[in-house]
Amino acid sequence: MTIGITGAGGFIGSHLVERLLRDGRSVSALDLAPTLPPNLSEWRDHPAFQYHSGDIRDPRALEPFLRDPMEAVFHLAATVGVRSYIETPLETIDTIVGGTRNVVDACRRRDSRLIFLSTSEVYGKNPKIPWNEESDRVLGPSSFSRWSYSASKGLCEHLVNAVHGAYGLPTTIIRPFNVYGPRQRPAFLVPATIYRTLRGERPLVYDSGSQTRCFTYISDLVDGLSRALGPNAIGRTYNFGSEEEHTIAEVVDVVLRECGASFAPSYVKTAQVLGDGYEDVPRRVPDSSRAREELGWVAPTRLGEGVRATVAWARQNPSWLANPGP
Ligand SMILES: NC(=O)c1ccc[n+]([C@@H]2O[C@H](COP(=O)([O-])OP(=O)(O)OC[C@H]3O[C@@H](n4cnc5c(N)ncnc54)[C@H](O)[C@@H]3O)[C@@H](O)[C@H]2O)c1
């Protein structure tokens, strides 16, 4: 039996491929790149690894990828990054809603287990912190394309739950919280701050820097994804998030310290960078007790430790530092 991963060439996907192959599983990977993406090059000749190029918006692209009997399909492919939701909401919606519909249908035809990567963004700006899996979703108006990602992922959760209810398809929904680590594009807070600092540029703090997030180190998330393959995760939704809350300004300070940099960050207004269509979320904090109690999952990596490992990786990968940036 093989495990399928859509979006396998991306940040989380490539770490999941590594974990599953190291655990002795067979992996069928799908992503947009016509040839093996750099994040997966290490596995080129691995006998239990296959790469398929394809777009999840095209149902025919899923056929070769899902040719073998599948133990489970991790569905990760999505348009990711706040700039994309704001600038290309149509692509965000087509990829997430249209693509997920195709993946769900393909899993249904094969009666294959489906593990859908949703997001903590589904909770929107709900002010009642911390959020558990039954917390309300509080979104801004649809005239703000910033909410297109959250709304699309939320609709896909309904789709996954509906297919589970109607046909008994074994499904699981995962909501990761601000994942970071080696290989992530410098379009997100931790890698963007490392990228700028190691290039000798002052890192950016958006607005007051007092917004908070809970940063989850990639190996902790991937450990949770592996636990989600267990039978007790079927039909369930899980928050996968560290419960260690930090302001954005604190995170930038931690990166500066770990990089050994002495310069101060630059404060910028989000509206100047992303336009008026952006609304920020003041606090984003999970209650991850369900994953702890049902799957035995914890996120033990403290922010300083995860940032140190990511900085060490960045220093050893000059090609990442040379890329054109966010
Ligand atoms: N990184 C985070 O903090 C985070 C948090 C919550 C949820 N998630 C979810 O986890 C998943 C993976 O995120 P990531 O951080 O690895 O992002 P990523 O951008 O690094 O990876 C996404 C991958 O999907 C691929 N992809 C995009 N459109 C596609 C299409 N139409 N067909 C096939 N492949 C396509 C991309 O090429 C990319 O390799 C996403 O579903 C995202 O919504 C991520």
Image (cartoon, helix red, strand yellow):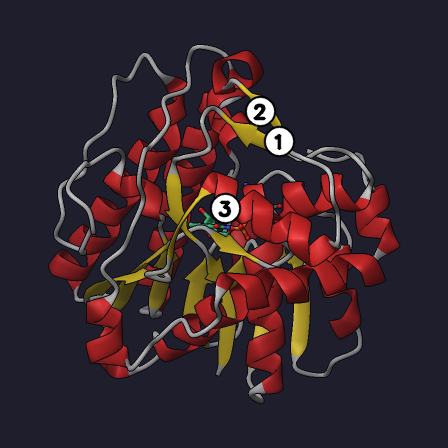
225 and 48: which is toward the camera: 225
Q: Residue at x 51, y 49 (%)?
A: 77
Query: Residue 91 appears at what percent x and percent y?
Result: 50, 27
Determine the CA span between mark 1 and mark 3: 12 Å
User: Which circle's residue, 1 or 2, is located before the other in the chain?
Assistant: 1
Query: Could you tell which of marks 1 and 3 lies nearer the N-terminus?
Result: 1
Check contact, mark 1 vs mark 2: CB within 8 A.
yes
Q: Which residue is mark 1?
A: 204
Closer to the observer: label 1 or label 3?
3
Q: Is residue 319 left or right of residue 295?
A: right
Q: Name the amino acid type tagged 1.
A: Leu
Q: Secondary structure at mark 3?
A: helix
Q: Kindly identify the residue that appears in the image at 14 percent across and 48 percent down.
A: 135
| Residue sitting at x 62%, y 31% | 204
Q: Which mark is residue 267?
A: 2
Quadrant housing the C terminus: top right
Residue at the spot of label 3: 250
Give amino acid for label 2: Tyr
User: Label 1, label 2: how many angstroms apart (C-alpha)?
Assistant: 6 Å
Q: Give the residue at x 18% y 55%.
A: 133
Q: Quadrant of residue 128?
A: top left
Tag 3: amino acid? Glu
